[in-house]
Amino acid sequence: AQSVTQLGSHVSVSEGALVLLRCNYSSSVPPYLFWYVQYPNQGLQLLLKYTSAATLVKGINGFEAEFKKSETSFHLTKPSAHMSDAAEYFCAVTPLSNFGNEKLTFGTGTRLTIIP
Amino acid sequence: DAGITQSPRHKVTETGTPVTLRCHQTENHRYMYWYRQDPGHGLRLIHYSYGVKDTDKGEVSDGYSVSRSKTEDFLLTLESATSSQTSVYFCAISESQLAGDTQYFGPGTRLTVL
């Protein structure tokens, strides 16, 4: 079964600094990959997803992620952090198949804090 | 935002009592899911539905049952709540079962079992 590992349960960056949140997947076949964001007391919102098209995926709010098969990674980045980016971020994976959306598997999350 | 509401948003109950959480969607999506969110575990699938009266178990289904009598409503029932079921519960919907299809999430229900 596929899984994802998010390195760092808490990440702090200064306002204006680079945001880098790490996600590595374990799967024998490159899967579909997702990043979701959860603001306090809210549900999850899709930031971006990789579905085997372009390896560099651009999402909402200035975030992007690059799929690297050789590193089995899908790290999330943003060039310049804003205070509004403070939230919890989840990486998720489903198998590369025509079905299986119910097999969406989440990482344990990374809480991002922005330092003024 | 996808039209998904969950009720109640907060609930405190006692061990051994039955509890039903409701998910309502206005998107007419066929697929609906119930997850629980716990610190250190991310989100884990409890049950899902692939149509009216069609449901299946997820990773952590023990102690939970579901029902779907209408496209728009998906109910999660804890027959006899236990303290281990204290969690935040999220409903999600998707248009298809395709693995790359986006799941849209509701605002969540925070359940505390004393």
Image (cartoon, coloured by chain):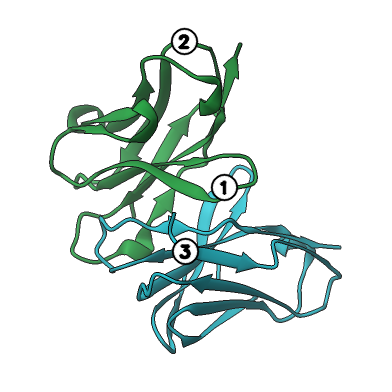
Chain colours: A green, B cyan
The residue carrying pointer 3 sits among few (fewer than 14), some (14 to 19) or many (20 or more) residues within 10 Å by Cα, namely: few
Q: Give the percent coordinates (x, y) of residue A106.
A: 44, 48
Question: Mark 1 or 2, which is nearer the eye?
Answer: 2
Q: Nearer the viewer, residue A107 or B23?
A: B23
Up the image or down, A4 lies above or below B85; here it is: above
| Amino acid type of the residue that numbered disc 3 sits on in the rendered structure | Gly
Q: Callout 1: residue from which chain?
A: B
Asked whether residue B65 appears in the rendered view, the answer is yes
CA separation, marks 3 and 2? Answer: 34 Å
CA separation, marks 3 and 1? Answer: 27 Å
CA separation, marks 1 and 2? Answer: 30 Å
The residue lying at 43 percent from left, 18 percent from top is A19
Tell me if label 1 and label 2 are in contact, CB under 8 Å: no
The residue that mark 3 highlights is B3
Q: Give the percent coordinates (x, y) of residue B22.
A: 61, 74
The residue lying at 24 percent from left, 64 percent from top is B98
Q: Nearer the viewer, residue B25 or B112?
A: B25
Q: Callout 2: residue from which chain?
A: A
Up the image or down, B71 lies above or below B9; here it is: below
Q: Nearer the viewer, residue B87 or B25?
A: B25
| Amino acid type of the residue that numbered disc 2 sits on in the rendered structure | Gly
Which mark, by number, is residue A12? Answer: none
Q: Give the percent coordinates (x, y) of residue B64.
A: 62, 76
Q: Please, what secondary structure does the residue beneath circle 3 have?
A: loop
Decide which of tag 3 and tag 1 comes sooner along the chain. Answer: 3
Q: Please, what secondary structure does the residue beneath circle 1 have?
A: loop
Question: Mark 3 or 1, which is nearer the eye?
Answer: 3
The residue that mark 1 highlights is B41
